[in-house]
Image (spheres, rainbow, N blue to C red):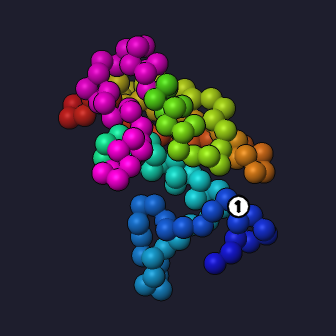
Amino acid sequence: MTAVGGRGFLGIGWRFPLQVSPAGAIATSALEQKIEESLYLILSTAKGERPMLPNFGCGIHDLVFAPGDAGTVAQVVSSVRDALSTYEPRIDVLTVDAAPAPGEPNVLLIRVDYRIRSNNARANLVYPFFITEGM
C-alpha cells in the first residue's frame, strides 16, 4: 500500500484503536491521521506498560491522583513534551499547554501544537487527561 501523492514518508499502518474495515480486513490509516494516532498512543501508554519497551509511553499516568495545582500541570506539560520528543521522530513539538476543562476540575485538557518535519505542516491535538479518576 502506498500513500497518495508521494507522501508515504508520513506512514501507513494499522488504525489505532484497532478496527476492522467494512471489507473485513484490519483497518489502516495513513498520512497525517497516522501521526495523530501515534501521538494518542504515546500519551495513552503508561511507562512500564509494555514489557518489551518499558520506557515507552508518557509519565502523566503517574500523576492520576495528584492535586490539580500548578505544580501538577507543569509536570504534565513536561512529561508530554519529553514523551513526544522522544518517541515521535516525525514531528517537532512546538508548544504544550494544559488547563482544567471548563466545569470539570478533574480533567486537564492537554493541547499539543506540532510541526510535521518532512513537510512543515502544522497541526494540533487536544488530549483529555483525568487528573483524579473516580470522582
Task: State left or right for residue 111 relative to residue 7.
Answer: left
Mark yes or no: residue 60 visible. Answer: yes
Secondary element at tag 1: helix
Q: Give x and y (percent) for residue 34.
A: 58, 59
* Residue drawn at point x = 42 percent, y = 44 percent: 56
Q: Does the magenta stretch include residue 97?
A: no
Q: How crowded is mark 1: few (under 14 residues within 10 Å), some or many (20 or more)?
A: few
Front residue of 32 and 13: 13
Front residue of 73 and 106: 73
The amino acid pointed to by label 1 is: Phe
Task: State left or right for residue 75 relative to residue 119.
Answer: left
| The magenta segment | 50-76
Q: Give x and y (percent) for residue 25.
A: 45, 82
Front residue of 41 and 103: 41
Compared to residue 72, the image places residue 111 above or below, namely below
Mark count: 1
Q: Is residue 72 magenta?
A: yes
Q: Name the residue under label 1.
A: 9
Q: Quadrant of residue 91?
A: top right
Q: Which residue lies furthest to the top in this view?
A: 70
* Residue drawn at point x = 47 percent, y = 40 percent: 127
Q: Give x and y (percent) for residue 84.
A: 54, 39
Which quadrant: the N terminus?
bottom right
